[in-house]
Image: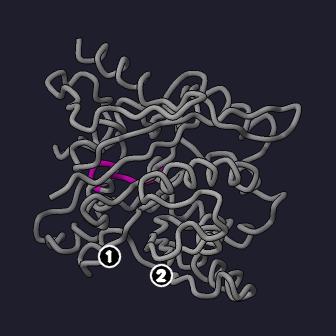
Amino acid sequence: MASKLLLSQLRNITRPTHHRLINPNFIFPLKNQTLIHSRPYSDAPQPPPVGSKPPPTNADSAPTHKKISSSLNQAELAKFSAIAETWWDAEGPFKPLHVMNPTRLAFIRSTLCRHFGKDPYSAKPFEGLKFVDVGCGGGILSEPLARMGATVTGIDAVEKNINIAQLHADLDPGTSSIEYLCTTAEKLVEEQRKFDAVLALEVIEHVAEPAEFCKSLSALTVSGGANVISTINRSMRAYATAIVVAEYLLHWLPKGTHEWSSFLTPEELVLILQRASISVQEMAGFVYNPLTGKWSLSDDISVNFIAYGTKNTE
């Protein structure tokens, strides 16, 4: 029953031709825990994979260290470190993100201008607002946000990514003011940093603990602020297109970039965001047109999708 209610609500928040917002007072039912895929984003300890090293003892892991690194996935960090120099190669491994970026920005401009009461047709609609781009990579999202007037902080756990992002930003006076930091969302929380909007695009599928990660995103957001998260649905269609086709047939991405078991369904994302005090207000899918080579927004969230939410007032 809870699954049917979630699916019904998701139909209401997926982005149609006209904007449609859900009732902000709606509470998603959490009683049916079978909705949650057996993936380590719950607060309960997870069994180690077969053949893995045993977990560290209590003496080996101080509470503060666990708090800082709870969402990091070292294997994923290594993947992106290996190809960091190619972030600004529009024909390289990150070509899909470069092609998708205008569509991602269209969703961000529309939803956040509405949220903050800004003019979406203004050259700098985000002037006066503080944004953090979590998992910024080489800065391909941070830079256009800065050009739209936002005071941007870009963070990434891979030092090579931050170095590339800083070098590229310094080439343009319009982006040289971006604050790039090699750090994690958890560390920023410890520093008590706060932002009007927190964005994490194509990141959550690469972290070890999505629930802890979302709690950190929430803690970084001012009361009543905005959150934007995009990822890939854990569907068979996503496996066929995002992994088999994109990685093994068309070679758009290096093989092994994604693991299907690490994807989240829209229902799961909504649930863990709700538990982190973030209410999803709108969701849209990204659809690729092979004839034009461009992406567009759609209400089809079966593969790539993006969600806009608001931090619950405290």
The amino acid at mark 1 is Leu
Q: What residue sits 47% from the left and 73% below the top? A: 155
Q: Position of residue 109 (x, y in %)?
A: 57, 55
Q: Position of residue 271 (x, y in %)?
A: 28, 36
Residue that extends furthest to the left in the rendered view of this protein:
58
Q: Is residue 202 left or right of residue 212?
A: right
Q: Nearer the viewer, residue 77 or 60?
A: 77
Q: Position of residue 284 (x, y in %)?
A: 54, 35
- Magenta stretch: includes residue 173: no
The amino acid at mark 2 is Leu
Which element carries disc 1, helix, strand or loop?
A: helix
Q: Is residue 91 left or right of residue 225?
A: right
Q: Which residues are magenta?
A: 206-212
- Magenta stretch: includes residue 208: yes
Q: What residue sits 17% from the left and 74% below the top? A: 64
Q: Assess whether mark 1 and mark 2 are in contact (beta carbons under 8 angstroms).
A: yes
> What colour-coding does the image apply?
one colour
Q: Position of residue 47 (x, y in %)?
A: 24, 41
Q: In the picture, residue 91 is in which quadrant?
A: bottom right
Q: Which residue is mark 1?
A: 188
Q: Is residue 171 above or below residue 212?
A: below
